[in-house]
Amino acid sequence: MRFNARIVPVLIYVLVCMGCGNNQPVDKAVDKGQQTDAAANAAKTRKTILFFGNSLTAGYGLDDPKQAFAGLVQARIDSLGLPWQVVNAGVSGETTAGGEGRIDWILKQPVDIPVDIFILELGGNDGLRGIPIDETRSNLQTIIDKVRASNPQVKIILAGMLVPPNMGPDYGKAFQEIYPALAAKNKTELIPFLLEGVGGEPKLNLPDGIHPTPEGHKIVMETVWKVLQSLLS
């Protein structure tokens, strides 16, 4: 039998108090132990939403990561009293190749918490760098396959992106088609364009013209929420 290290001190304290013939401290110790166990059980019933992306997910340029759309989703969930926790696994500069190499480690952190909803937001940096379309598509497919292998019941949302016009019309069209094609093939949910209503709007983006301001992230959150909310029931 394995003893829970957290419970052992409580048991010792109970035995000492019983030997002294005073039950009042024992009751308090037991109540505290019950409260701790109740909190632990409540945490286990919470399901996990994993946001896996680049600087957009990470909240690049913001004073507080909670201002990014993933953090705003958690705030919305908490306000509604829903039993979900958000994990922000965004890394600035991440490409689909980087994500494909990182996903195995992410899925093991922590081991005892499965991913129930997986939101995949990668590809924007591939497009800005002109990475071949087939490579981007293949990396995204591999990530989806690995996530499904870790939990066949996982629900996946694919966040679509666009590339600037300077990449050329042929590349831009082929890039845009990656996301709906993968969503249809893998039967995932799709956000057609994550930055809908934000991309190209100077007042909603930082001076770099790429990353949203806090106000921009609020709009992005609503775009994500439209797809996500139906999966939370």
Image (tube, rainbow, N blue to C red):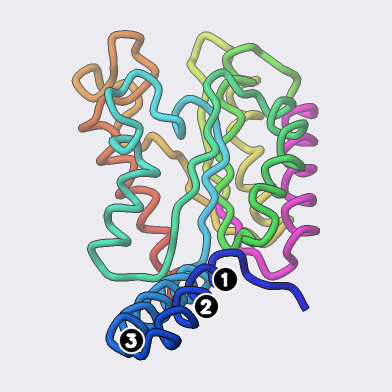
Say which residue appears at 65% left-offset and 47% top-offset: 109
Residue 50 vs residue 120, the one in the foreground: 50
The x and y percentages for residue 40 are 48, 70
Query: Range of the magenta residues?
Result: 134-157
**Image quadrant occupied by the C terminus:** bottom left
Residue 16 vs residue 151, the one in the foreground: 16
Is residue 231 shown to the viewer in this render? no
The x and y percentages for residue 175 are 63, 29
Say which residue appears at 64% left-offset and 51% top-offset: 110
Q: Earlier in the sequence, mark 3 or mark 1?
A: 1
Q: Which amino acid type is shown beneath numbered disc 3?
A: Asp
Is residue 205 placed above or below 51 in the rendered structure? above
Q: Which residue is mark 2?
A: 11
Quadrant in which residue 150 is drawn = bottom right
The x and y percentages for residue 50 are 54, 50
- Secondary structure at badge 3 equals helix
Q: Residue furthest front?
A: 20
Quadrant in which residue 83 is drawn = bottom left
Say which residue appears at 44% left-offset and 74% top-offset: 42
Q: Which residue is mark 1?
A: 8
Distance between mark 2 and mark 1 Cα atoms: 5 Å
